[in-house]
């Protein structure tokens, strides 16, 4: 097992969360290898241009701003080392407002690959339940 790769996964997602919290869509995009694929039950989108992926992240950042989400905390549930350069991870994302109150959480699966300069990059991002969790949260908000 590649201990270096195993340790880098947590640092990778902490850095990604910081980019998200800072609304730094360029840095968020930098965490992805182009081409990459974003997959959910409803969509499968392959991005061949970083600018198009960044455009998607700009939309997401707009959503976070609109609903007061200011903090993202990733919890890496598992790391399956497939090769010396490829790892599959399961991550639970918890999102918080300015008062540090939980907004919603969701699960993702990622395939990361060690790219040039020994940096991990996401090549596949699978949204397991984000749409459902966001819908549940928004329904709860309406009831209040």
Image (cartoon, helix red, strand yellow):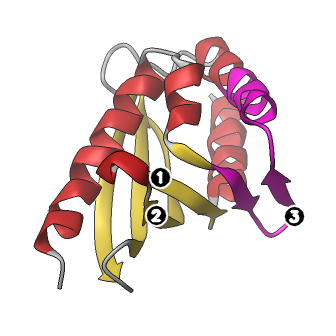
How many residues crowd around disc 3 within 10 Å: few (fewer than 14), some, or many (20 or more)? few
- Mark 2–mark 1 distance (CA, rounded to whole Å): 5 Å
Q: Secondary structure at mark 2?
A: strand
Report crowding for label 2: few under 14, some 14 to 19, many 20 or more residues within 10 A (C-alpha): many
* Residue corresponding to mark 1: 121
Residue 80 lies in quadrant: bottom left
Query: Residue sitting at 69 percent across and 56 percent down?
Result: 36
Task: Give the x, y percent position of residue 69.
Answer: 50, 22
Q: Secondary structure at mark 1?
A: strand
Asked whether residue 102 is in view, the answer is no
Is the residue under label 1 in contact with that under label 2 (CB below 8 Å)? Answer: yes
Q: Which residue is mark 3?
A: 42
Q: Looking at the picture, how far across and down is residue 107, in whole percent?
A: 51, 61
Chain-order first, disc 1 or disc 3: 3
Image point (56%, 46%), residue name: 32
Identify the image quadrant of the N terminus: bottom left
- The numbered mark, 2 or 3, whose residue comes first in the sequence reads 3
Residue ID for mark 2: 112
Q: Is residue 80 left or right of residue 25?
A: left
Q: Which residues are magenta?
A: 34-60
Q: CA distance from mark 1 to mark 3?
A: 24 Å
Tell whether 73 sits left or right of 54. Answer: left
């Amino acid at each position: 097992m590649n201990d270096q790769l195993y340790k880098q996964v947590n640092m990778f997602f902490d850095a990604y969360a910081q980019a998200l919290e800072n609304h730094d869509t360029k840095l968020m995009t930098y965490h992805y290898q182009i081409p990459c694929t974003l997959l959910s039950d409803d969509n499968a989108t392959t991005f061949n241009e970083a600018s198009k992926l960044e455009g998607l992240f700009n939309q997401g950042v707009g959503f976070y701003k609109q609903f007061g989400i200011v903090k993202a905390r990733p919890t890496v549930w598992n790391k399956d080392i497939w090769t010396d350069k490829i790892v599959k991870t399961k991550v639970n994302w918890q999102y918080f407002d300015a008062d540090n109150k939980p907004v919603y959480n969701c699960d993702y699966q990622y395939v990361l690959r060690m790219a040039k300069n020994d940096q991990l990059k996401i090549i596949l991002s699978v949204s397991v339940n984000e749409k459902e969790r966001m819908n549940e949260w928004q329904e709860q908000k309406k009831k209040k």
